[in-house]
């Protein structure tokens, strides 16, 4: 894997990692849609301790549909959402694909929460999909 890096809209927060993503997903859950303002969010999950973050972030926490704590980290200056963490998957962080410097490395492996997708949003027929978060 080549180095992955990215930054927020204003450049105050950046990150880099050489970790191979454990999973790359397109998430259609209502929370991801509201958070991003987009039809779905694409996330690359890597070990948190292998991500170097430069700049200060702020965070927002909420409960998932399964009761785990979700933490969303964003730039306090421009508001760009950069990272997601789930207490049920300790040690992993989801990097938001939309702010990556290497978009060619974003190759989703699965679509999740398709039961709550916007009805007009097409799904990639080559990707497995789950109505909710897989077990």
Image (tube, rainbow, N blue to C red):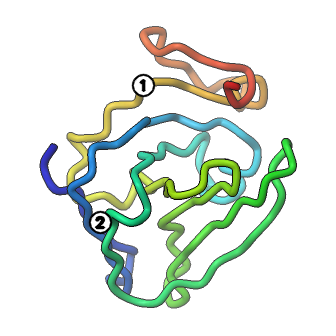
Left or right of residue 99, residue 120 in this image:
right
Q: Residue at x 40, y 30 (%)?
A: 108
Left or right of residue 125, residue 100 in this image:
left
Which of the numbered marks, if any, corresponds to residue 6? 2
View extreme (top): residue: 125
Secondary structure under badge 1?
loop
Residue at the disc numbered 1: 109
Mark 1 in CB contact with mark 2 (< 8 angstroms): no
Secondary structure under badge 2?
strand
Left or right of residue 54, residue 41 in this image:
right
Task: Depth check: give the residue in front, 50 or 29.
Answer: 50
Q: Residues within 10 Å of mark 1 (few under 14, many from 20)?
A: some
Q: Residue at x 59, y 41 (%)?
A: 40
Residue 22 point in image, percent of width and height: 40, 38
Q: Based on the displayed image, in which of its 4 quarters is residue 27 positioned?
A: top right
Q: Residue at x 35, y 77 (%)?
A: 53
Residue 126 point in image, percent of width and height: 42, 10
Which of the numbered marks, if any, corresponds to residue 98? none
Q: CA distance from mark 1 to mark 2?
A: 20 Å
Residue 113 point in image, percent of width and height: 70, 30
Against 9, residue 22 (above or below) is above
Residue 120 point in image, percent of width and height: 66, 24
Q: Residue at x 47, y 46 (%)?
A: 43
Q: Earlier in the sequence, mark 1 or mark 2?
A: 2
View extreme (left): residue: 2
Which quadrant, please, contains the C terminus?
top right
Against 87, residue 117 (above or below) is above
Task: Depth check: give the residue in front, 42 or 53.
Answer: 53
- Label count reads 2
Q: Residues within 10 Å of mark 2 (few under 14, many from 20)?
A: many
Which quadrant, please, contains the N terminus?
top left
């Amino acid at each position: 894997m080549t180095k992955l890096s990215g930054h927020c809209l204003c450049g105050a927060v950046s990150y880099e990692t050489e970790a191979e993503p454990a999973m790359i997903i397109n998430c259609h859950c209502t929370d991801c849609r509201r958070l991003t303002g987009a039809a779905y969010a694409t996330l690359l999950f890597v070990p948190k301790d292998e991500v170097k973050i430069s700049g200060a972030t702020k965070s927002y926490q909420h409960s998932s549909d399964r009761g785990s704590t979700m933490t969303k980290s964003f730039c306090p200056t421009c508001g760009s959402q950069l990272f997601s963490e789930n207490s049920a998957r300790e040690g992993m962080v989801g990097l938001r694909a939309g702010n990556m410097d290497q978009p060619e490395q974003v190759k989703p492996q699965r679509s999740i929460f398709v039961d709550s997708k916007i009805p007009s949003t097409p799904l990639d027929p080559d990707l497995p999909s789950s109505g909710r978060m897989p077990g």
